Image (spheres, helix red, strand yellow):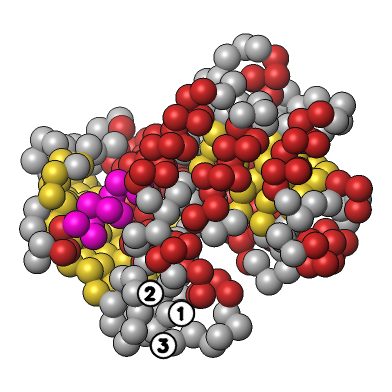
Amino acid sequence: MSRFADRTGPIRLGMVGGGQGAMIGSVHRIAARLDGQFRLVAGALSSTPDRAQASAAEVGLDPDRTYSDFVEMAKREARLKDGIEAVSVVVPNHMHLPVAREFLKRGIHVICDKPVTGTLADAKKMKAAVDRSDALFFLTHNYTGYPLVREARERVARGDLGDIRLVQVEYAQDWLAEVPARDNKQAAWRTDPTKSGAGGATGDIGTHAWNLMRFVTGLVPQAIAADLQSFVLGRALDDNAHVMIRFDGGARGTLWCSQVAAGEENGLRLRVYGTKAGLEWRQENPNQLFVTPLGGAKAIVTRASAVTTDVARALTRMPPGHPEGFFEAFANIYGAAAKAIRAARAGTGVADFLVPGIDDGVEGVAFVEACVRSSSRNAAWVQL
């Protein structure tokens, strides 16, 4: 039985993008259906008609609810009695704004992949579209959905670490360490400034690291100094970045993101150090949180164990010792979105379900553009 007690039937979901060969589309679909909160009923999975139909057939969509034009999809679905209530937007960054705007203005909730847009100007336009709409907007910074990330956030908030002094976050991969094959569509758009936006690694994975740091610590960044590189010959966007961060209140931080770190697969890691204790969490082993009191022994806090908080345990599906991972964390974002949508359905108001939204998206793109600006000035400090 789903842990969501207020379920009254699956939310009708559409998807734009995420067709054949698109990894993130299948991740969104799995996450959306994991708790039975959503049912995919329509999609424009590709802008090419034949590919759209073939992609839709693979996931079982009705041909009558299959589109190759997202504008047509938005218009028609808004008119249908059983039309979609929400849409997942999983197209390349430069298309997030035009796609989301079509659905927002028709009252259809939007669940958008990150970063929210490719440029800060578009991010601000997206915020304006969200503010004008009665629909809700969610951003899938999925790493915030891990139970032990929530545990870390709770421990920081209740003062277990004391006053935060230092934060270190990194996200290292190696999949772009060489010029990718020509048929690698994921690499092609992520390294193209016209589709990805101002940032390469900073936009693709640096925004995840930034959001994770902000989510767990609650610290407010004041200024950054960034050194960006494009190590692969001919690459137009950064594939590596080192960023120093100054926070309000005096804390200091560093952020490293790289897609050319040989041997790294998906190395997202967060360390937070305070006056009383430090903690560490790694996404590649997400069922453990390391907590070390000053002068004490390192403790391993495991997911769903007796020492975790109610907030963390509420996001777990399996008993301790049964690993949970990426899909489950992603599904927790969809689960929170479902709660908010149901609250909107009932007219009861939308509580804070800790799901990232438009403000997180704008901040993430502002971070990317600040990194580019700082690096162009020889890593000068830039105010945020």
Residue 175, numbered circle: 1
Q: Position of residue 170 (x, y in %)?
A: 31, 63
The amino acid sitting under disc 1 is: Trp
| Residue type indicated by callout 2 | Gln
Q: CA distance from mark 1 to mark 3?
A: 8 Å
Apparent side of residue 236 relative to residue 44 in the rendered image (left or right):
left
Q: Amino acid under label 3? A: Glu
* Image quadrant where one finds the C terminus: top left
Residue identifier under label 3: 178
Are dots 2 and 1 in contact, CB under 8 Å? yes
The answer to whether residue 146 is seen in the rendering is no
Q: Which residues are magenta?
A: 364-373
Within-10-Å neighbours for mark 2: few <14, some 14–19, many 20+ = many
Task: Kindly check if marks 1 and 3 are in contact, taking CB atoms under 8 A apart as contact.
Answer: no
Q: How many marks?
A: 3
Taking the spot 45% from the left edge, 75% from the top edge, the residue there is 265
Residue at image coords 39%, 84%: 177
Q: Position of residue 346 (x, y in %)?
A: 70, 14
Q: Quarter-wise, where is residue 12 in the image?
A: top right
Q: Is residue 58 left or right of residue 142?
A: right
Q: Under tag 1, what secondary structure?
A: loop
Instruction: Please name whichever residue, 192 or 3, is drawn nearer the observer in this view of the structure.
Output: 192
Q: Secondary structure at mark 2?
A: loop
The residue at the point 69 percent across, 36 percent down is: 86
Residue 169 vertical position relative to residue 237 in the rendered view, above or below: above
Few, some or many C-alpha atoms within 10 Å of disc 3 (few <14, some 14-19, many ≥20)? few
Q: Return the x and y of residue 317 as percentages of the image width and height.
A: 65, 45
To which residue does mark 2 refer?
259
In this view, the residue in front, 325 or 142, is 142
Q: Is residue 327 above or below residue 236?
A: above
